[in-house]
Amino acid sequence: MLDYREYNNVFPSPGIINPYDHKGVSAIETFRKSLRGVLFVDRVLSRLGISQGTAYPPKGENGLRSLHHQICQSKVSSHQKLCLLYYLLLDHDDIHPGRSQWADGFAEEAGLPRKYQILMRGLWHMDRKEFKYAIENLTHPSLPIEFADDITIALVRLPLANKRSATTTTSGIQSDYTLALAYFHAAQPVLNSSEALELLFGALARTNITAALDFSRKYPEWTRQQMFERLLASILEQPEKLGPHGRELVSAALTGEEEGWFEEYLRRGKGKRNKGASVLLRMRGVVTGRLSNVGVLESLAGYALG
């Protein structure tokens, strides 16, 4: 088995390739800045107590030798050390003409299990904002859920910032949640931070009312009420969606608490000033049999036009 503690057994000669020259380091720092100052490899380094995320990217060969030494001397398992070295070799593969296979060759010789390769490759793609490729790896059924909150935040905030796989323009960046929702549905992560929870629910509320409602019901009553009100606000904020999204919500089998929140928010709460509030109330009245449907379609059409 490969002795990864020997630098020359791991990395190709700097004369062959150097991903950490001035240009390479500058590119990585640009990615870090666009990801709110923290790369996923920074989180891995910090979690394992290695350099606290300050040693990456290494500066030239001397910096890489220093980082290799820190990794090898750290008090973590061999698999964890191999994961970090594998990540660094993905950098080497990335800039080699035709994409070399140093990372995979190293993993095979060093005995790094496949699931760890998939995880690190997924995080590497996240750091390069290649989100489509990232979730293909990070949703693999063999993987434990790691960094779910941070992944969710990045996917919701930067859904189309994919330099290699995005096929649309940046004009729809703020409204396209395809990749974030694909990750959520495939991985089913448990989110712990309020930011990740709010961002994910916002994406659900703007795209799938039933899924958002089901999601909200997993939480305690106070949180559920906040989410339900957010769901109503999202419908009211999108006049073009009032018809389809409104119908989906008012046709749902609401609980007693949800029925009360619905009435309170639209009649007396923050939603009452929105002219769509009366439309939703009338739509719900028709569904529940409290009102006839006369005039509801006209009100809806008038709201959309006005």
Image (cartoon, rainbow, N blue to C red):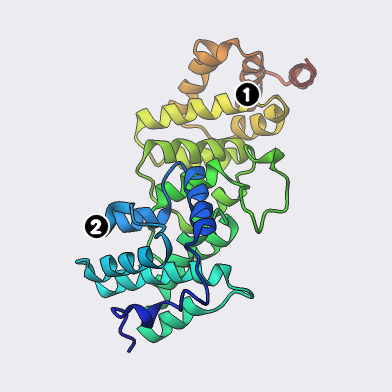
- Residue 250 percent coordinates (x, y): 60, 29
Q: What crowding class fits label 1: few (fewer than 14 Cα within 10 Å), some (14-19), or many (20 or more)? A: some
Circle 2 residues within 10 Å: few <14, some 14–19, many ≥20: some
For the residues labelled 2 and 1, say whether their Cβ atoms are less than 8 Å apart: no
Q: Which residue is mark 1?
A: 237
Left or right: residue 204 compared with residue 241: left
Q: Amino acid at mark 1?
A: Glu
- Report the number of discs: 2
Across and down, in percent, residue 186 comes to 51, 58
| Most foreground residue, 159 or 161 | 161
Q: Nearer the viewer, residue 47 or 70?
A: 70
Asked whether 221 or 175 is in front, the reply is: 175
Residue 188 quadrant: bottom left
Residue 2 visible in the shown view: yes
Residue 201 pos. (x, y %): 50, 38
- Secondary structure beneath disc 2? loop
- Mark 2, residue position: 49
Task: Looking at this view, name the residue that lies furthest to the left.
Answer: 75
Q: Secondary structure at mark 1?
A: helix
Q: Which of the 4 image quarters holds residue 218?
A: top left
Mark carried by residue 141: none
- Residue at point 68%, 27% (across, down): 242
Q: Could you tell me which quadrant the C terminus lies in? A: top right
Question: Can you say which quadrant of the picture contains the N terminus?
Answer: bottom left
Q: Earlier in the sequence, mark 2 or mark 1?
A: 2
Tag 2: amino acid: Gly
Residue at screen point 36% across, 63% down: 63
Rendered position, 208 above or below 9: above
Cα gap from disc 2 to disc 1, whole angstroms: 45 Å
